[in-house]
Image: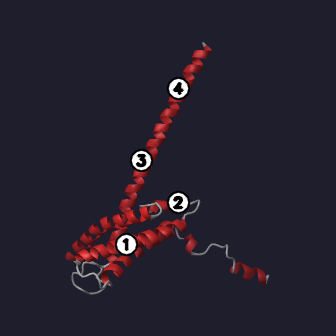
Amino acid sequence: MKKNEEFQKQNPYQSDKLAKIPSWIKILLLKYWAAAAAFYFFAVANPIAQNEDQYYVWVSFGLGIFLEYIVKTLVRFMKNSTDNTYRFNLINLKGVVSLLLNLVYSFVIVIPIMAITVLLQQHGISINLFGEYAVGIEPLMDGFIFLLIDAIAVLIKNLIIKGIKKYKFYKQEKKAQAIIGAANIKKEEEDK
């Protein structure tokens, strides 16, 4: 009896508490962490970046690297037969092409993130973690803004993919109906 209780406590196949959390929540937290970390390590804590242009380049590069090697990898590990987590990534390719596309995506997405951050700070709506006035980069707020913009981009990508699949299915269904119609006409001619 005592052995059975010990075995149940140490059962490696028993699901843990993290397995009960939906994958989309884990992916949101992962993307938020990656964006905030990229903004912190490559902009705020980067002694090389001296002006806004260098901030932009370093943050874009860091965000692209984090998206490629941390977020995409962990999202792939979360995929299973019941949950397709690939739909939460904007880019689902492999190799150098994926890295280049993630870098381009991060260079494009950092512009509105920085613009929205500056706009919010001008209106006094910002998470000012470091207590400085008018700092153009706040990692926590930039992480939230990244989540918003990335969610919109992923939603648009998924809607386009869904539309293409529906169009292909509709086209295939029309072709099947034409074949069935031709077979019915041929059968009617044979019956006469």
Marks 3 and 2 in Cβ contact (< 8 Å): no
| Amino acid on which disc 4 is placed | Gly
Residue corresponding to mark 3:
163
- Relative placement, left or right, of 100 versus 47 is right
Marks 1 and 2 in Cβ contact (< 8 Å): no
Q: Distance of mark 1 from mark 3, alpha carbons?
A: 29 Å
Residue corresponding to mark 2:
84
| Amino acid on which disc 3 is placed | Gly
Nearest to N terminus: mark 4 or mark 3: 3
Residue corresponding to mark 1:
63
Q: Distance of mark 4 from mark 1, alpha carbons?
A: 55 Å
**Residue farthest bottom in this picture:** 131
Nearest to N terminus: mark 3 or mark 2: 2
Q: Distance of mark 2 from mark 4, alpha carbons?
A: 37 Å
Nearest to N terminus: mark 1 or mark 3: 1
Identify the residue at horizontal 57%, vertical 24% (top origin).
183
Q: Residues within 10 Å of mark 1 (few under 14, many from 20)?
A: many
| Amino acid on which disc 2 is placed | Asn
- Relative placement, left or right, of 31 versus 39 is right
Element class at badge 4 = helix
Q: Residues within 10 Å of mark 2 (few under 14, many from 20)?
A: few
Percent position of residue 156, x then y:
37, 56
Element class at badge 3 = helix
Nearest to N terminus: mark 2 or mark 4: 2
Residue corresponding to mark 4:
181
Q: Distance of mark 3 from mark 2, alpha carbons?
A: 18 Å
Q: Residues within 10 Å of mark 4 (few under 14, many from 20)?
A: few
Percent position of residue 10, x then y:
69, 80
The image quarter in which residue 97 lies? bottom left
